[in-house]
Image: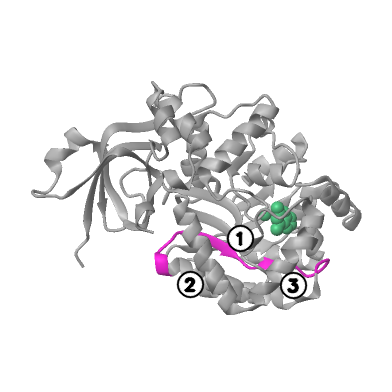
């Protein structure tokens, strides 16, 4: 088969390393070409560089897409999101446990219907691509068909995605409880989907209150049996949840110990929220290479609390950025960074644009152990891209023209951009979303 070659001339931004916490990115961490050329070959990036320098190596008569007024970054990554909650975003006035009972559990019951799961999978992926997000770690419902529908929709688009069927066998409506079939259904889904093309399976116990010890132990056995699997759950989000866990697991020294005892804490484990942790728990997570998904718009929406990035950095605990739709209020990576900045301001820990965009791309890829495949504009990486139109609204055009440095421009985008600023989204070398064509 002949590989398609694509040449794009644009401003390019990527991070080869963590830029650090200072006002300027650490030397060598930022890859920036004001007038760059991105050369795609098939599904991968073939070359990246300065336009004038790369031009002589291009084939004769190469057709070059002229995106000189656009900014290209690696596609954004969302490390924690519930596709089955898309339709309950912005449900009024509750904190976590009431919000689950009043809105979330009834909504997730609808996913017993395969046609509904298919429709929502497609709607969710359309929204992700509109937001410039090309990879996510995704919760289905407890119905295995919710994950079949989701992976089928991802496969059609050739997306790199992680997902799993929720495991829950107590403390929720009967219609959502999976009992003994939960683990068997998980094994079947792993067999059908894990490692297939760009898809990976995340074993998904919802959180300690809705799984018995037996179910969590069985989930741990799956992970021990196959270290290439991922694990996603929730940890220490809300004070009512903490009290409930203490009551349900009187023998555990703390919330994290419940997951440790089941063998759920490892380098491919993502724990959403991690707001109410002490340094001892942070250190234990760091030692095992697990990471927290910081979900700022969700934490503000549910009034859960403020994630302490400084404490994470001090203890070496890894964290990533996530939307947590349907408790999150914004599917956009830009919106997530805006909320993260606001949380940081309330704690005296402002977030630089360097940290923010590194986080959405290379940082999130690293947290998910996908950093050899995605998260950078560099040769041999998969060609998942977001093409940003920095002057997409009259206000942004004014603000961007007022900036004198790249740092200022990126910060303005982090605070003011949204899906209107996503001009195109490319997945594995193909344009899958065009703002102006829908
Ligand atoms: N904890 C357990 N389940 C959920 C959920 O669906 N959303 C959030 N935000 N927290 C949870
Ligand atoms: Zn969640």
Question: What distance separates the C-alpha of mark 2 from that of mark 1?
Answer: 18 Å
Q: Nearer the viewer, residue 362 or 405?
A: 405
Of callouts 3 and 1, the N-terminal one: 1
Q: Nearer the viewer, residue 190 or 118?
A: 118
Q: Residue 351 in the image: x percent, y percent?
A: 57, 29
Q: Is residue 157 magenta?
A: yes
Tell me which label, 2 or 3, sits earlier in the chain: 2
Q: Residue at x 63, y 52 (%)?
A: 324
Q: Tell me if I can see residue 375 in this picture.
A: no
Tell me which corner region of the image, top left, top right, bottom left or bottom right, holds residue 57. Answer: top left
The residue at the point 33 percent across, 43 percent down is 378
Give the residue pinned by disc 1: 86
Q: Is residue 243 above or below residue 197?
A: above
In the rendered structure, the answer to whether residue 246 lies left or right of residue 303 reads right
Which region is colored magenta?
156-172
Q: Nearer the viewer, mark 2 or mark 1?
A: 1
Q: Quadrant of ligand 2?
A: bottom right
> What is the number of the mark on residue 176?
3
Report the quarter where the N terminus lies: bottom left
Is disc 2 placed on a helix, strand or loop? Answer: helix
**Which tag, 2 or 1, sits closer to the chain's start?**
1
Residue 269 locus on image (x, y percent)? 63, 52
Which residue in the protein does label 2 denote? 152
Q: Residue furthest left?
A: 60
* Disc 2 to disc 3, C-alpha distance: 22 Å
Horizontal side, residue 256 vs residue 435: left or right: right
């Amino acid at each position: 088969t002949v590989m398609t070659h694509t040449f794009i001339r644009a401003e390019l931004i990527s991070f080869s390393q963590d830029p650090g916490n200072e006002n300027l990115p650490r030397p060598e961490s930022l890859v920036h070409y004001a007038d760059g050329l991105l050369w795609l070959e098939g599904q991968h990036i073939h070359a990246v560089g300065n336009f004038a320098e790369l031009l002589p190596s291009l084939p004769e008569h190469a057709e070059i897409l002229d995106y000189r007024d656009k900014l290209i970054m690696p596609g954004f990554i969302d490390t924690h999101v519930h596709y089955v909650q898309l339709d309950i975003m912005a449900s009024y006035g509750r904190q976590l446990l009431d919000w689950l009972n009043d809105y979330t559990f009834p909504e997730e019951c609808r996913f017993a219907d395969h046609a509904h799961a298919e429709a929502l999978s497609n709607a969710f992926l359309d929204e992700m691509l509109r937001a410039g997000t090309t990879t996510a770690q995704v919760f289905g419902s407890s119905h295995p068909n919710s994950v079949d529908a989701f992976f089928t929709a991802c496969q059609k688009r050739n997306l790199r995605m992680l997902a799993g069927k929720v495991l829950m066998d107590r403390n929720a409506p009967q219609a959502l409880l999976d009992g003994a079939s939960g683990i068997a259904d998980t094994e079947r889904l792993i067999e059908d989907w894990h490692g297939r093309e760009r898809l990976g399976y995340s074993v998904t116990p919802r959180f300690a209150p809705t799984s018995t010890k037996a179910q969590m132990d069985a989930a741990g056995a799956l992970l021990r049996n196959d270290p290439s699997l991922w694990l996603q759950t929730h940890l220490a989000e809300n004070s009512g949840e903490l009290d409930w866990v203490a009551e349900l697991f009187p023998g555990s020294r703390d919330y994290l110990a419940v997951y440790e005892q089941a063998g759920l804490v490892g380098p491919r484990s993502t724990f959403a929220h991690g707001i109410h942790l002490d340094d001892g728990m942070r250190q234990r997570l760091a030692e095992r290479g697990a990471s927290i998904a910081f979900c700022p718009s969700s934490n503000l929406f549910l009034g859960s609390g403020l994630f302490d990035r400084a404490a994470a950095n001090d203890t070496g605990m890894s964290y990533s950025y996530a939307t947590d739709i349907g408790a999150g209020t914004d599917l956009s990576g830009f919106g997530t960074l805006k909320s993260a900045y606001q949380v940081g301001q309330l704690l005296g820990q402002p977030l630089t644009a360097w940290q923010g965009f590194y986080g959405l791309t290379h940082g999130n890829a690293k947290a998910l152990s996908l950093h050899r495949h995605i998260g950078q504009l560099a040769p041999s990486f998969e060609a998942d891209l977001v093409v940003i139109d920095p002057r997409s609204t009259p206000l942004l055009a004014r603000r961007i023209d007022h900036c004198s440095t790249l740092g200022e421009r990126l910060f303005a985008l982090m605070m003011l951009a949204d899906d209107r600023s996503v001009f195109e989204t490319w997945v594995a070398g193909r344009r899958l979303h065009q703002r102006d064509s829908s």
